[in-house]
């Protein structure tokens, strides 16, 4: 079952345009959403939240059209941005009192249990918390009313590695039930390598790929050598190229390259670089 569907979506905002974007996120999976700043990630998330309307195409969450079922859908999704959009004078205890009145499915036991597990104070005002504490609190709030979907926009941005790991642990806790799904936009691709099942890559408003993460990393390889040695690489296998001082580096499709040729597994960062800059 597809929990999130984006079908042939176009959206123009001034000089920027999303062009025919299509991807889906299956139940029980985490999709990493990658691309440079200004590529259209935040615009896509706003379309999924019905904060923007598509010029063409349709978006679905939990099988329902986003434009026609906004109230019902928003009761079942958790949204986390890189900043915590909750009044800064409130404490976690205040948030519990407020949100249990706002959300019929708010679970105080879940909220306090997660606060304790991840060492987030109950009585400190948000304005006194560190960026890491605020990040953990934002996700804890989103998890405490039993959403089916999480939409995350740079939730680990600016956090130290230890706190980032705790945030990823929170997300894995959420995914313990198989009917849930996460779409996470992040520039920290090492986080996505740890938790994502698939990668959605857009560049300048256009889809470059939507692939299973393991298939991406094992379906492609990086070869490095001199220009003379490069003759062993079939031209039709080459996806991208980067020149360096003593030779050349290729991103290649493994299926078109002899198994005796040594290739290294690309990182998500390397895939991005080759797909964008290596094709020029």
Image (spheres, grey):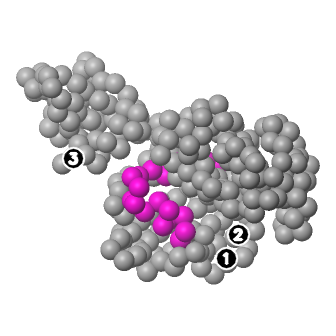
In this figure, which residue is indicated by the disc labeled 1? 70
Does residue 36 show up magenta in the picture?
Answer: yes
Give the quarter of the image for residue 22: bottom left
Residue under the point 57% across and 55% down: 153
Is there a contact, CB below 8 Å, between mark 1 and mark 3? Answer: no
Q: Is residue 49 above or below residue 208?
A: below
Instruction: Point out the residue furthest to the left here.
Output: 228
Q: Position of residue 60 (x, y in %)?
A: 58, 69
- x and y percent of residue 9 in the render? 44, 71
Q: Residue at x 36, y 71 (%)?
A: 17
Residue that numbered label 2 is attached to:
74
Please tell me whether mark 3 sits on a helix, a strand or a loop: loop
Q: Is residue 249 magenta?
A: no
Q: CA distance from mark 1 to mark 3?
A: 40 Å
- Number of marks in the image? 3
Q: Which residue is mark 3?
A: 279
Q: Nearer the viewer, residue 61 or 33?
A: 33
Q: Residue at x 63, y 55 (%)?
A: 83
82 and 182: which one is in front? 82
Q: Residue sitting at 44 percent across and 47 percent down?
A: 211
* Range drawn in magenta: 28-47
Is residue 137 visible to the viewer in this orientation of the structure?
Answer: no
Regarding residue 109, the answer to whether it shows in the image is yes
Where 185 falls versus 42 (above or below)? above
Alpha-carbon span between mark 2 and mark 1 = 6 Å
Label 1 sits on a secondary structure element that is: helix
Q: Secondary structure at mark 2?
A: helix
User: Residue 112's x, y, as percent?
Assistant: 88, 46
Question: Is the residue 160 above or below the residue 111 in the image?
Answer: above
Q: CA distance from mark 3 to mark 2?
A: 40 Å
Query: Cβ–Cβ below 8 Å for labels 2 and 1?
Result: yes
Q: Quadrant of residue 149?
A: bottom right
């Amino acid at each position: 079952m597809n929990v999130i569907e984006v079908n042939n979506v176009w959206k123009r905002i001034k000089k920027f345009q999303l062009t025919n974007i299509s991807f889906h996120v299956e139940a029980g999976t985490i999709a990493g959403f990658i691309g440079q700043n200004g590529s259209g990630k935040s615009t896509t998330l706003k379309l999924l939240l019905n904060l923007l309307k598509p010029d063409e195409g349709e978006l679905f969450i939990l099988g329902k059209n986003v434009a026609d079922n906004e109230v019902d859908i928003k009761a079942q999704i958790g949204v986390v941005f890189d900043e915590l959009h909750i009044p800064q004078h409130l404490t976690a205890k205040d948030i519990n009192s407020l949100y249990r009145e706002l959300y019929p499915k708010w679970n105080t036991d879940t909220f306090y249990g997660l606060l304790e597990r991840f060492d987030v104070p109950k009585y400190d005002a948000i304005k006194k918390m560190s960026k890491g504490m605020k990040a953990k609190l934002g996700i804890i709030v989103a998890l405490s009313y039993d959403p089916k979907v999480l939409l995350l926009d740079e939730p680990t941005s600016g956090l130290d590695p230890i706190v980032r790991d705790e945030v990823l642990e929170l997300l894995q806790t959420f995914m313990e039930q198989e009917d849930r799904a996460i779409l996470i936009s992040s520039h920290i691709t090492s986080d996505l390598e740890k938790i994502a099942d698939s990668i959605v890559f857009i560049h300048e408003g256009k889809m470059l790929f939507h692939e299973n993460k393991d298939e991406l990393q094992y379906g492609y390889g990086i070869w490095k050598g001199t220009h003379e040695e490069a003759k062993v690489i079939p031209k039709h296998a080459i996806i991208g190229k980067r020149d360096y001082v003593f030779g050349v580096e290729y991103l290649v499709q493994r299926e078109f390259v002899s198994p005796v040729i040594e290739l290294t597994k690309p990182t998500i960062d390397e895939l991005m670089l080759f797909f964008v800059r290596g094709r020029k």
